[in-house]
Image: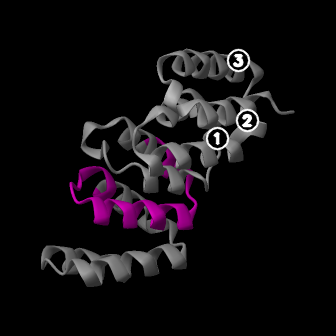
Amino acid sequence: MLLDKFKKELNNGDLENALDTIEKIGLMQDYTTVPALINYLVSTNNNVLRDALAIALADIGDHQAIEPLIGLLKSPKTLKSRGTLLYALESFNCSNYAELITELLFEDNFEVSRQAFILLEAQMLHISNGVKTKCIKRIKRELKETPDKVQFLTESMDLFLED
């Protein structure tokens, strides 16, 4: 089984092959591997491994992955490496987390802010009007504080205004 192979490669410090195996697991969309992949996702401190696990979970498409991915977006250990986590969330309806994702628009990390924009854009049909209003207010506050991001934040606000 590929999961056993992955565990062995990881235990032997063979990260390169472990990453290849994770990709294969994701492509096979084996739902039985989801709990183990989530466990590795939340426990690793290796950004490359975490990103590969996030993408594999997105490829599998099991909704069990949403909460752990969201949790990692909030974690200090992912402060400089949240772009791929946001990318992985594109596979799911995570409109309930629009306010959190909106906060990531304000990150100084270009990849994270733009990936948050893309994720919000994909979720827009599922976000309630009340949450949209809250997000618009938050963006307006940020616009006052960071005039150097006017164009990007205005475009982000426009997402919430479109019907």
Mark 2 and mark 3: Cα distance apart in space: 11 Å
* Quadrant placement of the N terminus: bottom left
Name the colouring of the figure: one colour
In the picture, measured across the screen, residue 69 lies left or right of residue 137, that is left
Look at the image and give the residue range highlighted in magenta: 40-67
Above or below residue 14? Residue 60 is: above
**In the image, what residue occupies the spot 62% across and 48% down?**
118
**In the image, what residue occupies the spot 39% across and 57% down?**
35
**Could you say whether the residue bearing mark 2 is in a helix, strand or loop?**
helix
Return the disc, 2 or 3, that comes first in the chain's sequence: 3
**In the image, what residue occupies the spot 24% across and 74% down?**
7
**Could you say whether the residue bearing mark 3 is in a helix, strand or loop?**
helix
Give the amino acid type for the residue marked by disc 1 in the picture: Leu
Give the amino acid type for the residue marked by disc 2 in the picture: Leu
Locate residue 17, reporting x and y percent. Answer: 28, 84
Return the disc, 1 or 3, that comes first in the chain's sequence: 1
Locate residue 105, reporting x and y percent. Answer: 52, 36
**Residue 159 — which label?**
2
Q: Nearer the viewer, residue 122 or 25?
A: 122
Q: Could one spot residue 100 in this view of the protein?
A: no
Q: Could one spot residue 160 in this view of the protein?
A: yes
**Could you say whether the residue bearing mark 1 is in a helix, strand or loop?**
helix
- State yes or no: discs 1 and 2 in contact (Cβ < 8 Å): yes
Residue on which disc 1 sits: 120
Return the disc, 1 or 2, that comes first in the chain's sequence: 1
- Can you tell which of label 2 and label 3 is closer to the viewer? 2
- Can you tell which of label 1 and label 2 is closer to the viewer? 2
